[in-house]
Amino acid sequence: MSSAADFRLRDVAVPAFAPSIVNAVGLGAITPVLALLARDLGASVGQAAFVVALLGLGSLVGSLPAGALVARIGERRALVLAGVVDAAAMALAALAPSVWVLGVAVVVSGMAWTVFLLARQGFLIVVAPPQLRARAMSTLGGSHRIGAFVGPVVGGGLLALTQDLRSVFWLAAVMALLAALVVVLAPDLTAEHEGGPGRARPESVLRVLRQHLRTLLSVGSAVVVIAGARSLRITLLPLWADHLGISASTTSLVFGAAALLEIALFYPAGWVMDRHGRTAVAVPVVALLGLGVLSLPLTSGLVGFTALALLMAVGNGLGSGIVMTLGADTAPEQGRAQYLGGFRLTGDIGGAGGPLVVSALALVLPLGVVCLTLGAACLAGSGWVAHRVSRIDRGRRGLARAQRDAP
């Protein structure tokens, strides 16, 4: 592990962040057209939406196996394997003759993406000193946002040239292979931490999770709230735009402006977390998102809608890397990858649960009431997040004092 004095993020930019950006370009490229390909294959609107949701489901079911895989073969090999598997999944999607084949490909891609994220997180825990950990994690989160912003632009350009939805999936396959190639060619900064024949057999995921169950339930409950609040932005903003009669193209432009704002905030968010603690970011994330959702029924046109979309982008941008940072703060040295898999599962539960709650409430309540209900719930949840995350900050401050006072 590097010391704060000699560690610089730019020194690990290629091995740490370049593969993430490249891989995220592919994921970002397919996201806008995934439902359209499903529709071309004969899916109904509901079935097409389910195919899109399968990406998150793959991530959810892959969290624990991903932790076991990274622990067994090491971060570097896991990254290469994830890139190859993701490329195969995207090629299968490009060739899919039916909706169910496309769905299988999407699930596999979601699982590969989880392996990729866990391996990158583990890499940064090893190479970044604790004093700069949040900046490292927020930059990793920012690299995903950069790729997700560039991906639709590149995919849209390719689609304009080919007029073929499947070409975008071939692009994603190439990006996944390129990400794996970058890992192979980049310097190996964690060789001594990689799994291998000479290393002790890793503990089982369930054993590690049982050992750290109290922490997972404590901090994980805050992560569920954070991830759930962030998922509301993606779910409710398009629905409210449609309710106001704002066109899809205009809504896309608003989302693009919000994405740029989020990209601008990822490094400042990490700086704040390193200097002032995790609570200083975690609470505003949930509170700003809750305030935005709560205020949506007050808007009646594009200006108000855009203002709230940007407000929520500030909250979401400040949250860049917050979940990964909390996971890194609480991860044990032994069984780290298995623990991170379980920790990621809590975020996936919140991310998947938010849209499900919106769907369930929308069946019985008007959309405006749904916004008021969930916005108020987020504001209340910010108090719970403050309670749980502040314990981590107190522990970090106590550890820092003990290290300073040590002879």
Image (cartoon, rainbow, N blue to C red):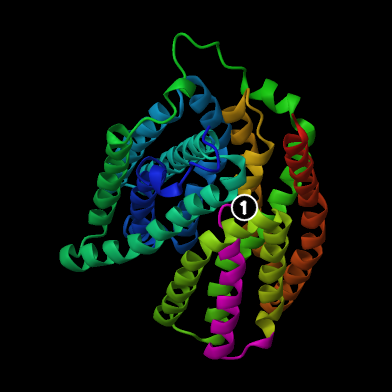
Residue extending farthest top: 198
All told, the count of numbered labels is 1
Is 260 part of what is drawn in magenta?
A: no
Residue drawn where x is 39% and y is 79% of the image: 249
Residue range highlighted in magenta: 298-321
**Could you tell me which residue is drawn at 37 percent across and 51 percent down?**
21
Horizontally, is 197 left or right of 233 in the view? left
Q: Horizontal and vertical percent for residue 317? A: 56, 64
Q: Residue at x 62, y 17 (%)?
A: 203
Residue 57 or residue 75, whichever sits in front: 75
For residue 388, side relative to residue 61 (left or right): right
Residue occupying image coordinates x 46% and y 69%: 259
Expressed as whole percent of the image width and height from the top left, the position of residue 240 reads: 58, 78
Can residue 285 be seen here? The reply is yes
Q: Quadrant of residue 130?
A: top right
Q: Is 23 placed above or below 247 here?
A: above
Left or right of residue 123, residue 407 in this image: right
Q: Is disc 1 placed on a helix, strand or loop?
A: helix
- Residue under numbered circle 1: 322
